[in-house]
Structures are given as structure tokens and as C-alpha cells.
Amino acid sequence: REDAFDPEYVEKMRSAALFLANYVWPDYTWELFNDTFQQTKNVLLRNIKNYSAMFPDENVLTYLASERRDGAVPTESLISFPVGGYYILRTGWNGKESMFILKNNYNPANEYHCHMDNGTFALWSKGRNFLPDAGVYTYGGTTELDVKRKEYIATASHNTLTKNLQTIAKNYSKGRCLLTRTSEAEDLVVTQNASYSDLTHRRAVYMLDKEFYVIVDEAFGSATACDVNLSFHLCEGTVVADDSSTECAYGVHTEFPDGNDMLLRTFSETASGFNAETGISHCSTKMNTYYDRTYYRVTVDKAAAADVSRFITVIYPARTAEISATFTSDFDESSSSVKVTLNGKVYDL
């Protein structure tokens, strides 16, 4: 029915089609951000085929609609949708790549189906979703279900930063994109959100050597006498803690029988009040069902308004690695510099 619509409208649909094509994981499923429900490959592939028929000049649609048989292999490693607030970093397009989706929406009214989770992300690698979104579980409607809904949409239930584990309030989801940059060795996205009236969260995500990721989190503002928390929720399976709390570092690694594993290590610049823990959180892929999974959280004190809480997290596809990370510049609202050493190789970022 394309002929029933104004050509300008059809062109606007191009952006929506391209977003979905870039949003699906390599196995043609998708992430459960916001109130998105689990969907099958058959449905999503059928939709992409329809989009490709509408826009045959879009190579990525041709490539994915043909299940990677037609069209040129896409070369984009960083795909941005800054108005909606989604950023995709990917190591390739062969179906076995790693793919990182960063979410930082502009939704001041916290309307309806959008969860209060700016700065969160999910990471897929070689067929496994290592840091899936919490999902939806329920729309609420009863006292009991309303409590459950608040749990799943809570900021602390996502892979992002909080103040005192508080959920981002109405009028505070105003995600901004500060910078994108891409090259053969480094892809970078920097986003920011004033998540609370007195605390702003800036997050920089680097993809390095098309192999691993570094996340730099900085929390600044007039907030005093509060905790700053950084949470990461892993997938179902064996997750082992790597405790270096005496050095203000903490993390986890997975142990899967197939050897497809992921290691996360967080380094805190702030030593005051440093505390790290693992625990159990929930993930829902269907209404009224969930499974248990492991999260880890690093917390520090922000005592004074001038204090800035800064963290570096390295995410590497292995069980073990030699990793160190430190900030190499003082805090500045327009820049940041860190040094990461991974298995002997130094990255000045």
C-alpha cells in the first residue's frame, strides 16, 4: 500500500526500518529494552524483508534480508541514532561478531513504555547475550504487580549509574550525545544525562581493536553525602567474582562450557567508601516469568559538591586477562583521558 501514502511519509519510514535492522542481534532476535517483548527470527526477518522491498537501495537491508547472501558486507562499526538515543558498536557483520547497544533516550516525561535507565547497555558476543536488559515482566495493574513493574523499570536494575540506587525521576531522562568518533582501531560514543537534580552522568564507551570495550563513567554535580553506584547485570549462568577491593577494583567473569566467556573489571578512582558486591537480580523475557542472574555493583562516597566519582570498566571476551586502568587527567566537563593496559598492551584514550 505504499502508493496510498505521501512520498515524504514513506521516506520517514526509512529511518524506522534502518533502526530496526541495526537493532536486531546477529541471530535475528532483539534486545528487550523498555517494554519490548521477546520476538522470533521468523517475524523479524520477515519484517526486514518487507523493509528491503520498500528500500532496495539500502544495502544493510538487502544484506540482512538475504541472511547475508546478497549485497555488500556492511563496514559500519558505529551506528548512531542520536534523536532516539541508541548507539550500536559492532566488531563485524558475519553473524559471529560482538555487538554493543548503548541506550540514552530523550524522554523527559518518562512516558509509558520507556524505562528509566539512561546510560544502560546490552552486549552480545558470538551467540550469547552477556548483559541483557531486565525486560518488562508486567505492565502492572494490581498492587503486587505494580511493585514488580517498579523493580524491572528501576534504574538500578540496569547496567548504568545511580545515586543512592534511586530511579531516575520524571523530567530527568534527557539523554544527549556529546561525541561520536570512529577509526580502524577505536570507535567512541560519549553520552550524558542529568539523571538527578544534583548529579549528572557522563558515559564514554570505547570499542578498541574491534575486539573489546572500555567504559568510562563520570558522575558530577552538587550532590553531597550520597552514594554513587555503578551496576552491571550479567546473563544466566556461572558468574565468578574477581575481588580486588583492596585496590579499589572489582569485577566478574563468566564460565561457560563452550568457552565463549566475558570478563568485566571496574576500577574506581575514588577510594572513599569503596564497596563492591555481587547479588541476584531478575531478568524477564516473557510476561510474568523471570530467571535469576548475577549482578555486581561498585559503590563510592560522594561527600562534597566538588567531588567527582569516576570509574573505568574493561569488558574483554575471555575468562582471564591482565588488566589495569587509571585516569590520566583531572575531571573536566569537556574532556577525559584514561590509560588502559590489557595483556601488556597500553591504550591511551
Image (spheres, helix red, strand yellow):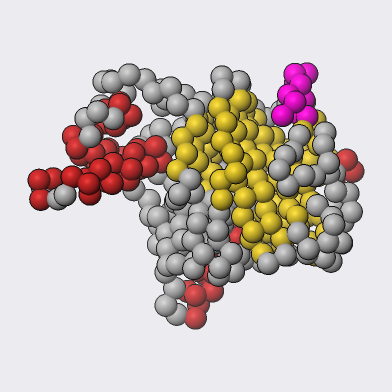
Q: Is residue 65 left or right of residue 164?
A: left
Q: Is residue 28 magenta?
A: no
- Who's the residue at 75% across and 18% down the image? 345
Up/down of 126 relative to 197, above or below:
above
Q: Is residue 341 magenta?
A: yes
Up/down of 231 relative to 339, above or below:
below
Give how far across and how far down residue 72 sits, in percent: 32, 19
* Numbered range of the magenta stretch: 339-349
- Who's the residue at 45% across and 67% down the image? 111
- Who's the residue at 85% across and 57% down the image? 306
Give how far across and how far down residue 45 sits, in percent: 27, 38
Q: Nearer the viewer, residue 346 or 330?
A: 330
Q: Is residue 165 left or right of residue 85?
A: right
Up/down of 65 relative to 249, above or below:
above
Q: Residue 120: tell me if it is visible.
A: no
- Who's the residue at 72% across and 39% down the image? 335
Q: Residue 195: tell me if it is visible.
A: yes
| Secondary structure, magenta segment, majority class | strand
Up/down of 301 relative to 265, above or below:
below
